[in-house]
């Protein structure tokens, strides 16, 4: 039992170290784009599917100069060039503009366009919930649904 605990701890430490390497790589890529100008970022977490983050270098008119993506399930994913968006207005991007069979990448592209439109309109851009926050929200939704169901059942009993 102790051996299993040690293996779990070692695996956690290795995963944390590799995650830090991936975050450092992403940060370096973001900083390199940011030094060239404004950057619009879109993200879509994947859960058990490949998550995606896109970064678009844009000019003062919102035209895309360069695109990069980080897509994958594991901590081994790296930032790669996202071609095909150069010269397009970021505010007009839609989910359908992304590559087929890359659902979360398409959603991240759509999120980048939405984030840009909100920024230009002066709206606040909310932070996405953390994984623990999402679990808490899911539990809260289940509890609310159960309460509604109980009230509906009670109302049916009273009306009979």
Image: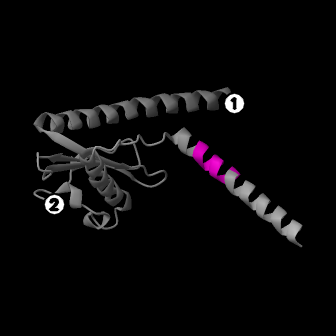
Mark 2 packing: few (<14 Cα in 10 Å), some, or many (20+)? Answer: few
Left or right: 38 as drawn, with respect to 110: left
Quarter-wise, where is residue 151 in the image?
bottom right
Name the spot of residue 116 as percent of width and height, x first: 26, 49
Tell me what residue is drawn at x 35 percent, y 42 percent: 125
> Where's residue 152, x and y in %?
77, 64
Q: Which residue position holds label 1? A: 1
**What is the x, y in percent for residue 47?**
48, 50
Say above or below: 52 vs 99: above
Residue under numbered circle 2: 84
Gap in angstroms between the C-alphas marked 1 and 2? 53 Å
Q: Report which quarter residue 101 is drawn in.
A: bottom left
For the C terminus, the quadrant is: bottom right
Q: Residue at x 23, y 47 (%)?
A: 120
Sequence-earlier tag: 1 or 2: 1
Q: Is residue 127 magenta?
A: no
Residues drawn in magenta: 136-143
**Nearest the camera: 58 or 27?**
58
Q: Residue furthest front?
A: 159
Which secondary structure lies at badge 1? loop
Q: Nearer the viewer, residue 52 or 72?
A: 52
Residue 54 appears in the figure: no
What secondary structure is the stretch in magenta mostly built from? helix
10 Å crowding of disc 1: few (<14), some (14-19), many (20+): few
Q: Is residue 134 above or below residue 86?
A: above
Horizontal side of residue 103 vs 86, given as left or right: right
């Amino acid at each position: 039992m102790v051996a299993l605990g040690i293996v779990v701890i070692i695996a956690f430490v290795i995963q944390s170290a590799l995650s830090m390497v991936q975050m450092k790589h992403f940060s370096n890529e973001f900083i390199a784009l940011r030094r060239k100008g404004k950057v619009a970022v879109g993200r879509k977490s994947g859960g058990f599917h490949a998550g995606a983050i896109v970064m678009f270098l844009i000019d003062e008119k919102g035209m895309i100069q360069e695109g990069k993506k980080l897509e994958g399930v594991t901590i081994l994913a790296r930032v790669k060039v996202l071609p095909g968006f150069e010269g397009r207005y970021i505010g007009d991007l839609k989910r359908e503009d992304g590559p087929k069979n890359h659902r979360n990448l398409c959603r991240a592209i759509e999120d980048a366009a939405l984030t840009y439109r909100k920024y230009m309109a002066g709206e606040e851009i909310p932070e996405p919930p953390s994984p623990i926050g999402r679990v808490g929200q899911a539990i809260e939704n289940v509890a609310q649904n159960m309460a509604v169901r109980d009230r509906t059942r009670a109302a049916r009993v009273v009306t009979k």
